[in-house]
Image (tube, rainbow, N blue to C red):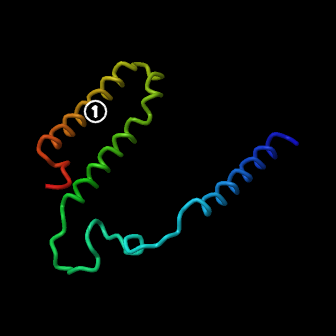
Amino acid sequence: MNLISAIMLIATALSAILAIVSFWLPQIIPDHEKLSPYECGFDPLGSARLPFSLRFFLVAILFLLFDLEIALLLPLPWGDQLPSPLLTFCWTTAVLVLLTLGLVYEWLQGGLEWAE
């Protein structure tokens, strides 16, 4: 048996085992909370005229901001291959310091508090 067929066999067997175990493990006991739809943090069965919490949008925007930070820092390990790696690390440090200061500011202003 060559290497590629062995890898394919192991991958297929592992996938099958994980799929079978995932059907056996969860306890299928439906209750009211599991069966009700989730609509962005508010009760979907109540009145549609209730004001919507803007804190949900704040958390979503902060998540996108720090997700973008990871995307910007992803090519950093290849930065040492450049002619001036010190400049790359200085710019990276500046971005991280700026984002950290923004996070501290949001934290001190109480923007990260979900409940009042």
x then y, percent, for residue 86: 36, 18
Q: Nearer the viewer, residue 11 or 30?
A: 30
Number of numbered labels in the structure image: 1
x then y, percent, for residue 109: 11, 44
Residue drawn at x 17%, y 42% is 107
Q: Nearer the viewer, residue 47 or 27?
A: 27
Q: What secondary structure is marked by label 1?
A: helix
Q: Amino acid at mark 1?
A: Val
106 shown above or below 116: above
x then y, percent, for residue 22: 60, 59
The answer to which image quadrant residue 73 occupies is top left
Give the residue pinned by disc 1.
Answer: 95
Residue drawn at x 42%, y 30% is 76
35 shown above or below 85: below
Left or right position of 9 against 100: right
The answer to which image quadrant residue 35 occupies is bottom left
The answer to which image quadrant residue 6 occupies is top right
Quadrant of the snapshot with the C terminus = bottom left
Q: Nearer the viewer, residue 50 or 82?
A: 50
Residue drawn at x 29%, y 76% is 44
